[in-house]
């Protein structure tokens, strides 16, 4: 295996020195458990997560300790058979130490929103989104009643469409007519008819004195 690794790596001094060191220190080779290819990304994530934050041997697999020897069991990867061992406590500790990562070794690397480079910016963006959602929720909670068409126009443009531009009296909707669809709403047909003030009376109350075109569709109270 080391020969294949040496052939695949760039022939730098560091790589050659490292491979030579492994040849000398690991004369008996390596214990490698090469499993079959992962079937899905979910399977791979669960497999990695299982070993990322767990010890090499689960506590429930330790069945006995008499002060000198530790008895435990595991599943042999070659035979898939349960194996029970009883070894001295010092040897047991040594086996566990072999699985402890070196100081500063990166077990987990974060990318995307969790990356250290973008984490601060991502948190600020998420906090802005949170504040926006909270304000939206508070607004909807404070005014759960849907606005009428008149209230929406006042809110958007600051003008009341039912306020007469001449006498400043409030009017009611009489008729809505569209050049393509004709009458969309007619008060005499769709609602109760209310008599309006005359055009002359409305114009008399126009303080500016200028002539304003009479719109018969909107009638003052």
Image: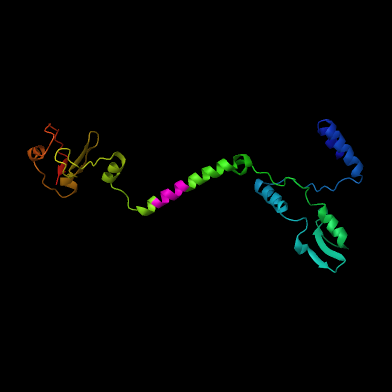
Total of numbered circles in the picture? 0
| Viewport quadrant of the N terminus | top right
Q: Nearer the viewer, residue 90 or 44?
A: 90
Residue 68 image point, x, y percent: 88, 66
Tell me if residue 160 comes above or below residue 85 in the rendering.
Answer: above
Q: Residue furthest top?
A: 11
Image quarter of residue 200: top left
Q: Does residue 136 show up magenta in the picture?
A: yes
Expressed as whole percent of the image width and height from the top left, the position of residue 174 reads 17, 43
Q: Is residue 206 left or right of residue 103?
A: left
Residue at image point 85% right, 56% down: 94
Q: Residue at x 38, y 54 (%)?
A: 141
Q: Nearer the viewer, residue 109 or 36?
A: 109
Pinpoint residue 82: horizontal percent, then vertical percent: 81, 60
Q: How is the image coloured?
A: rainbow
Q: Position of residue 113 (x, y in %)?
A: 59, 43
User: Residue at (62%, 39%) from the top-left corner?
Assistant: 117
Q: Is 210 on the left-hand or right-hand side of 8? A: left
Residue plotted at (65% across, 48% down): 42
Decide whether the magenta segment is chiefly helix, strand or loop.
Answer: helix
Q: Does residue 76 appear anywhere in the picture?
A: no
Q: Nearer the viewer, residue 215 or 68?
A: 68
Question: Is 211 part of what is drawn in magenta?
Answer: no
Magenta stretch, residue numbers: 131-138
Relative placement, left or right, of 13 versus 164 is right
Q: Is residue 131 visible?
A: yes
Q: Position of 142 compared to 196: left or right?
A: right
């Amino acid at each position: 295996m080391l020969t294949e690794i040496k052939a695949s790596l760039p022939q730098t001094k560091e790589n050659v020195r490292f491979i030579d060191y492994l040849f000398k220190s690991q004369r008996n080779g390596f214990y490698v458990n090469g499993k079959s290819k992962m079937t899905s990304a979910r399977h791979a994530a669960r497999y990695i997560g299982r070993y990322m934050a767990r010890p090499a041997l689960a506590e429930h697999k330790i069945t006995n300790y008499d002060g000198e020897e530790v008895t435990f069991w595991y599943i042999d990867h070659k035979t898939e058979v349960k194996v029970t061992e009883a070894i001295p406590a010092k040897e047991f500790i040594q086996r566990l130490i072999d699985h402890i990562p070196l100081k500063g070794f990166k077990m987990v690397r974060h990318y995307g929103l969790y990356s250290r480079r973008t984490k601060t910016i991502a948190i600020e963006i998420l906090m802005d989104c949170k504040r926006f959602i909270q304000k939206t929720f508070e607004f909807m909670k404070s005014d759960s009643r849907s606005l009428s068409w008149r209230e929406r126009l006042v809110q958007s443009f600051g003008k009341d469409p039912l306020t007469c531009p001449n006498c400043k009296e409030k009017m009611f909707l009489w008729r809505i007519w569209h050049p393509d669809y004709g009458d969309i709403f007619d008060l005499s047909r769709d609602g109760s008819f209310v008599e309006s003030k005359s055009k002359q009376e409305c114009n008399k109350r126009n303080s500016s004195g200028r002539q304003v075109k009479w719109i018969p569709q909107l009638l003052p109270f």
